[in-house]
Image (tube, grey):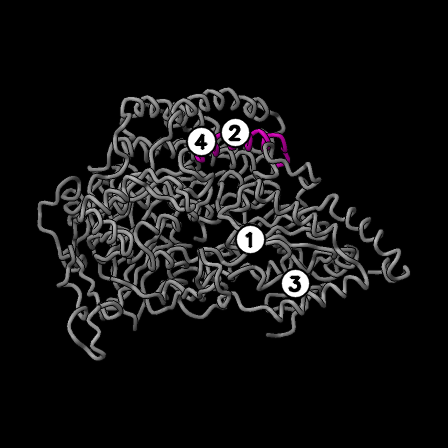
Amino acid sequence: MGLEEQLPAGFALTTVEKLAGYMRKGSLWPATFGLACCAIEMMAAGAGRYDLARFGMEVFRASPRQADLMIVAGRVSNKMAPVVRQIYDQMPGPKWVIAMGACASSGGMFNNYAIVQGVDHIIPVDIYLPGCPPRPEMLMDAIIKLHEQISDTKLGINREQIIREVEAAALASKPTFQIQGLLK
Amino acid sequence: MSDNQNASGSFGVHGTGDTSGYGLLVRKSAHPGSTERPYGGYFDEVADELEKAYPEFATDIERIVIDRGELTLHVKAERLAHVARVLRDTPTLRFEMCMGVNGAHYPQDKERELHCVYPLLSLTHNRRIRLEVSVPDSHPHLPSLVEIWAGNNWHERETFDMFGIIFDGHPGLTRILMPDDWIGHPQRKDYPLGGIPVEYIGAVVPPPSERRSYT
Amino acid sequence: MTTYDPYASSRETTEGRVYSVTGNDWDSLVTEIGATKEERVVVNMGPQHPSTHGVLRLILELEGETVTEARAGIGYLHTGIEKNAEYRNWTQGVTFVTRMDYLSPVFNETAYCLGVEKLLGITQEIPERASVLRVMMMEFNRISSHMVALGTGALELGALSPMIFAFREREKVLDIFEMVSGLRMNMAYVRPGGVAQDLPDGGLKKIRETVKELRHNFKDNEKLLVGNTIWMKRTQGVGYLDLAGCTTLGITGPVLRSTGMPWDLRKSEPYCGYENYDFDVITNNDCDVYGRFLIKMNELEQSLRIIEQACDKLEKLNGAPVKVEDKKLGSPADLTVGADGMGNSKEHIAHIMTQSMEGLIHHFKLATEGFRVPAGQVYTVVESPRGELGAHLVSDGGTHPYRVHFREPSFNNLQSLSAMCEGSMIADVVAAVASIDPVMGGVDR
């Protein structure tokens, strides 16, 4: 992260953050990682009716070296897991991951020996998108939320502070099944 | 409605005194016996032609079952390749296509646990039959039919991968669906489903293989 | 695990030296390979590749640009659906089975439900309206699946516009699916005993309009590709597989029909009332990629014919039931979303809570354990867009299937890859795979 270290801390960083965030979200290029049924909905999102080209994302890069967004669309089997990790490692930073669909987020309906129960066992995920399969409009909503996340990313000292706060909140929170009073 | 003669252990007081029945039900698998002639439809013709073309018909075909409009020939495991070749080559039978190999595991049938089913299709006569063989768990070997129907190559690899049946004479019997270094054969009944418990807000739900079952 | 550096430029394995191309290393790679005496190189078109239809791994041994050996590595999408179905109801099995071949979900469901109905012995009691609805959904699914096959096949060979046109037509078909069943894909619409719900009001009118639009718009793709010199040069003579090869490999569907054999299960073993529809079986004598492409284009028109005939039948059968009459098997249709967000049928609730004890008992038994299916095994087939889709179901008399196995057409069709590709160029491998049209969800299940 060379640019931020060389600037004076505090005052100048706020406008650089906004500028960098705007540039980065401007035209995210996804890497082709369609695995199963969600891949078809991802292709439909890139086609004529639900147009991903309005975000500059219609060009799905075949090579992960040229991509910055990995949309894991579909169920990740145990045989495919090392491949997912290798593709993620081959992407240069900054990179983001959307886990599209129930199977990529948590294993979905396939709670068995063959499917990795959530791709976040293998790679860090930024946005989880539920659905089986999620409609193309849901995928675009996830991408817009990711854009907001990217444009609000802090850099340098502010980023380290945010990371510390998030970690503290996660350590202090209750496990999911102990949360009371929210069942409908 | 409920075939209780096939199941035992469901009612009565045992051990803890639980009379609800779930968790203790043991089902015996019942396989249909041989059907008597006449079979109906084209099945009589198929059986007659096979008897003419294949001299050891009486010893090698263990059972002929007609159930729900389908003919199943139960064949002895060692003679499978011979029967298959006759079925493919005899002009009046001409089952040119084999629709794959399916395995099934019946752990209660001692000495005949692993079944393999081959659906056959004849394009010239528009007929379908099925071949079934059984092998024991202790010696799960079957002759490979790749030389007769080349399409069985991947099907036999899949049956080996999922059930552990070894096909002698297969050109390259390796795992095809699971990773190459996987241990175990997943679709056998003694292999666990392998799910994990799922956390929701306020509850944990066990995987489907460990939930209470009412049947 | 031994130390394995995925970014090393090469490493020794038991099969020889394996080179990884990581970028900026073309010169060193060429010098290294040139120093060995190898003339043949094994190239991995790995599971993540824009031109292989899904997660298919192609292992090609190349001599220059010619492929000397081609192997396919599969299993990257193995989901264990067949084992999972053994832990669920017969009705819940539909939702699992529908996700196997995800481009033709209705065919998976229909093969499974026909098998369950054969085991139950109620094939003659399925209402005619349900059969007609099944036929209509299947033919729409055939259109949407062929659209993806044509679009992605053209995309892989470099033609970008046909994909946009194809997906535009597919969206119209997905609108129909959404109107009829509620979901665009993986609908779980066909259930054992009939279909889940009837057409909504105004549905028939929308279907007829869509058929007119589709018929008009199919000409766009035809004008682009049929008779196009570049397309023909890329696809004619490529991926040759004749009738003997098809029968020994167990290949069915457009690949078999491209050899000249008019084999279509809708004509030879009719199911769901297909004998009452008037349509042609499209064949071609070329045995190559171009022939299969023409077959797919012409099958679209035949599907539209069948849908129009189905619409006429549906008009006559207005008001007929869509689920089997036997209350021990069929759960009620026509659910509506209530105030609490859950789907219920108000008449059904009133009936079971206040009017009928038997109704309440049936509802309880069906909801907790599902219906029981007598013991036995069946093998039912349907003609899916890729070939013969067979469902082999074994029941032990209980409420859960004992063994569910699907004979997927893509599994057999993909075995023909070696026969089609060896001796041709790498670019022809892409064309051949596109013409086989494998769907990896069906191959790996």
Is label 1 or label 4 in front? 4
Disc 1 crowd rating (10 Å Cα; few below 14, some 14-19, many 20+) is many
Q: How far is disc 2 from disc 4 in space, using C-alphas? A: 11 Å
Tag 4, which chain? C
Residue at the spot x=53%, y=46% of the render?
A38
Is label 3 or label 4 in front? 4
* Both marks 3 and 1 on one chain: yes
Q: Which residue range is magenta in the image?
A: C156-178
Residue at the spot x=23%, y=37% of the render?
C126
Q: For the residue marked with disc 4, what is the amino acid?
A: Ile
Residue C169 has which mark?
2
Disc 4 crowd rating (10 Å Cα; few below 14, some 14-19, many 20+) is many
| Image-quadrant location for residue C396 | bottom left
Q: Quadrant of the C terminus of chain A?
A: bottom left
Q: Is residue C7 something that shows in the picture?
A: yes
Local secondary structure at mark 2: helix
Q: How far is disc 2 from disc 1 in space, using C-alphas? A: 30 Å
Asked if disc 3 and disc 4 are in contact, CB closer than 8 Å, the reply is: no
Residue that mark 1 sits on: C57
Tag 1, which chain? C
Local secondary structure at mark 1: strand
